[in-house]
């Protein structure tokens, strides 16, 4: 009965792995391209940049520094009863109004700079989302590779332990073995089957995460990727890259610009505002046929004197926000520095673990082969064989895990330097950017152009 169960498990593993790898192979670079092109997190971040860019046009339009021109027309028909007679009157007016702020103490300039800085914050959020998605996709890919290899290794273990159970049972049947040998082999086989089933479940979980980030089921993945010159050669080089490129640091610096511009705008609000207002038009009485043209020009100057302390509070609040934003830069730099050191250490540790595991695996194979030969001539027990196999399996699993961790640490280090992008990785995708959209928003006459199109 047990042999039938084990046979079914073995056949299931072969079919499971065949179905996972029978389709066209998918490289890590292709998986990252799919993740970049289809992930909703990146698409949402891109829309946020575009929405933030519209604040530039909104602040410019509300400021009035650009002219505001409006056309108006109305028609009036009225009836008056006087002395028992109904007197009808019908008239219409047509006019154009013009309004423009000639000077506002440069308050609008500060607000526009603040809006542009906020666009930079959103742009860095897009880069951060891209790094997060690509790192998650790479990790998911490597986890599937790792779990697939562990399933294969543990399936081989089950086969090995099955052979040991049969061998011990055969020896017991001819009086050359003991029931203890059979029990030890069966116990180790049960452990191997449990470990194998756990690997199958872990592989299923890894495949589900892969589909979540990449957008499709994994197909015959492999542990291979060329980083080119993306990996820094030292901690100092990694930190230099991060200071120039990491989105968290650049976002924090953009937040300083936002706060500085907010402080400037709050201070400029104390200054005068000069406005020009003009109207031209005319009215037509349709009953009498009289036309009355009209025109007016007005220049208005206003200077704030007292607004209940709100303006002073705004300045103090803006100054505090500026100080807080400068502290935010230091905090971002500390966090990125810690991430770089952690990733660098993980990469170096994984390299050392791979070398140690490879050396140990070679020795463990020699030991296992020797113990098996010695057990055949009665110099070793079956327990010695089982223990030697367990030692070999342990170092082989350690090597598989270390190899996966090495790639994950490498991607984490690249992300910590701020260079984990579609362009730097050379992905075959269309780069998602809001630069063209921002340029259109900066076009101050786009409303008039849209009317003429």
Image (cartoon, rainbow, N blue to C red):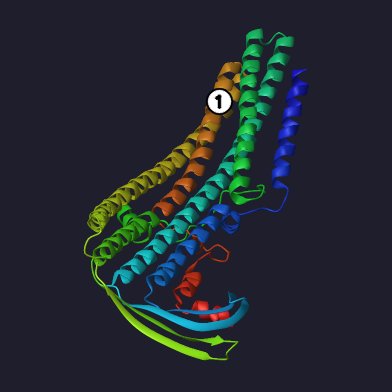
The part of the image, by quadrant, that contains residue 208 is top right
Q: Residue at label 1?
A: 390
- Is residue 379 at all visible to an observer of this figure? no
Q: Residue at x 60, y 24 (%)?
A: 372
Relative height, residue 90 to residue 191 (above, below): below
Please state which of residues 415 and 1 is positioned toward the viewer in this rendering: 415
Image-based side of 344 in relation to 148, left or right: left
Q: Is residue 408 visible?
A: yes
Q: Nearer the viewer, residue 330 or 148?
A: 330
Which of the two residues, 152 or 261, is positioned nearer the viewer here?
261
Q: Residues within 10 Å of mark 1 (few under 14, many from 20)?
A: some
Residue 1 location, x and y as percent? 78, 17
Q: Which quarter of the rendered picture does the C terminus lie within?
A: bottom right
Instruction: Give the x, y percent position of residue 254.
Output: 34, 60
Q: Secondary structure at mark 1?
A: helix
Image position, residue 323 (x, y; %) = 24, 53
Q: Residue at x 66, y 31 (%)?
A: 155
The foreground one among 404 and 170 is 404
Residue 121 to residue 357: above or below: below
Image coordinates of residue 341 in percent, x first then y, are: 34, 46
């Amino acid at each position: 009965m047990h042999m039938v169960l084990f046979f079914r498990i073995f056949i299931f593993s072969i079919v499971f792995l065949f179905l996972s790898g029978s389709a066209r192979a998918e490289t890590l670079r292709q998986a990252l391209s799919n993740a970049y092109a289809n992930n909703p997190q990146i698409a949402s971040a891109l829309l946020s940049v575009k929405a933030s860019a519209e604040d530039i046009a909104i602040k410019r339009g509300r400021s009035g520094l650009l002219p505001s021109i409006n056309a108006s027309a109305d028609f009036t028909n009225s009836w008056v009863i006087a002395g028992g007679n109904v007197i009808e009157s019908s008239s219409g007016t047509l006019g154009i109004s013009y309004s423009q702020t000639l000077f506002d103490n440069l308050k609008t300039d500060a607000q526009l700079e603040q809006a542009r800085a906020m666009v930079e914050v959103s742009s860095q959020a897009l880069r951060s989302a891209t790094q997060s998605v690509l790192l998650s996709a790479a990790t998911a890919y490597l986890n599937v590779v790792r779990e697939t290899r562990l399933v294969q290794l543990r399936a081989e273990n089950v086969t090995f332990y099955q052979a040991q159970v049969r061998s011990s049972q055969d020896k017991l049947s001819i009086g050359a073995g003991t029931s203890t040998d059979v029990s030890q082999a069966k116990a180790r086989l049960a452990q191997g089957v449990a470990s194998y089933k756990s690997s199958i479940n872990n592989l299923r979980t890894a495949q589900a995460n892969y589909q979540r980030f990449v957008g499709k089921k994994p197909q015959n993945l492999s542990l291979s990727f060329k980083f080119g010159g993306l990996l820094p050669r030292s901690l100092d080089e990694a930190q230099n890259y991060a200071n120039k490129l990491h989105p968290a640091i650049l976002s924090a610096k953009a937040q300083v610009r936002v706060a500085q511009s907010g402080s400037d705008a709050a201070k400029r609000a104390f200054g005068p505002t000069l406005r020009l207002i003009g109207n031209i038009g005319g009215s037509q009485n349709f009953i009498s046929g009289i036309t009355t043209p009209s025109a007016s020009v007005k220049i208005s100057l206003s200077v704030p004197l007292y607004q209940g302390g709100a303006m002073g509070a705004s300045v103090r609040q803006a100054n505090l926000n500026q100080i807080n934003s400068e502290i935010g830069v230091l905090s971002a730099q500390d966090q990125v520095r810690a991430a770089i050191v952690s990733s660098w250490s993980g990469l170096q540790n994984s390299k050392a673990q791979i070398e140690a595991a490879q050396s140990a695996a070679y020795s463990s194979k020699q030991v296992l082969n020797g113990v098996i030969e010695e057990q055949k001539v009665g110099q070793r027990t079956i327990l010695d064989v089982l223990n030697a196999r367990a030692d070999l399996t342990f170092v082989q699993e350690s090597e598989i895990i270390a190899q996966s961790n090495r790639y994950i640490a490498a991607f984490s280090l690249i992300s910590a330097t701020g260079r984990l992008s579609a362009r730097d990785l050379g992905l075959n995708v269309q780069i998602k950017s809001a630069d063209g959209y921002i340029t259109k928003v900066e076009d101050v006459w786009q409303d008039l152009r849209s009317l003429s199109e």
